[in-house]
Structures are given as structure tokens and as C-alpha cells.
Amino acid sequence: MMPDLGKYAVAVLGSYLATALLIAALVALTLWQSARMKRALSEVEARQGKSDG
């Protein structure tokens, strides 16, 4: 159920596509950074646990 966009259909649909791709990229980047930070935190905690005895 899409409204008739007339001569602006390509521009509007292209904008929707670009927005969806940018949101997907931001979500992927956030998940990647989260996993990287969790690994780094685990490494730091492991080092501290070993040095504390």
C-alpha cells in the first residue's frame, strides 16, 4: 500500500534505501565495537586476575 509518488518515486525510494543501509551499517558497527570492547575487557580482567595471585 504505497502512495503514488509520481516523478519523485526514484528519489524517495532511493532515500529510503540509503537510510536503511545507513541504519544497518550503524547497527553492525555498534555490534562489532561491542564485541571488540568485551574481548578487550576480558583480556584486562584476565591479566589482573593472574597478577593478583
Image (cartoon, rainbow, N blue to C red):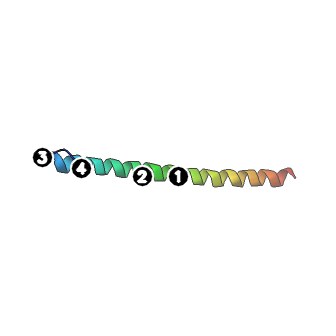
- Tell me which amino acid carries mark 3: Gly
For the point 30% across and 51% down, the residue is 17
Q: Secondary structure at mark 3?
A: helix
Q: Is residue 14 left or right of residue 49?
A: left
Q: Is residue 38 left or right of residue 21?
A: right
**Disc 1 or 4, which lies upstream in sequence?**
4
- Image coordinates of residue 16 in percent, x first then y, are 29, 48
Q: In front: mark 2 or mark 3?
A: 3
| CA distance for labels 1 and 4 | 27 Å
The residue furthest left is: 7
- Tell me which amino acid carries mark 2: Ala
Q: Which mark is residue 13?
A: 4
Residue tagged by mark 3?
Answer: 6
Query: Callout 4: few (<14), some (14-19), or many (20+) C-alpha neighbours within 10 Å?
Result: few
For the point 64% across and 55% down, the residue is 39
Residue tagged by mark 2?
Answer: 25
**Disc 2 or 1, which lies upstream in sequence?**
2
- Tell me which amino acid carries mark 1: Leu
Query: Callout 2: few (<14), some (14-19), or many (20+) C-alpha neighbours within 10 Å?
Result: few
Query: Callout 1: few (<14), some (14-19), or many (20+) C-alpha neighbours within 10 Å?
Result: few
- Image coordinates of residue 13 in percent, x first then y, are 24, 49
| CA distance for labels 2 and 1 | 10 Å
**Disc 2 or 3, which lies upstream in sequence?**
3
Q: In front: mark 3 or mark 1?
A: 3
- Seen from the viewer's position, the closer of residues 5 and 44 is 5
Q: In front: mark 1 or mark 4?
A: 4
Asked if the residue at tag 4 contacts the one at tag 3, i.e. Cβ–Cβ closer than 8 Å, the answer is no
**Disc 3 or 1, which lies upstream in sequence?**
3
For the point 83% across and 53% down, the residue is 51
Residue tagged by mark 1?
Answer: 31
Question: Number of labelled discs?
Answer: 4
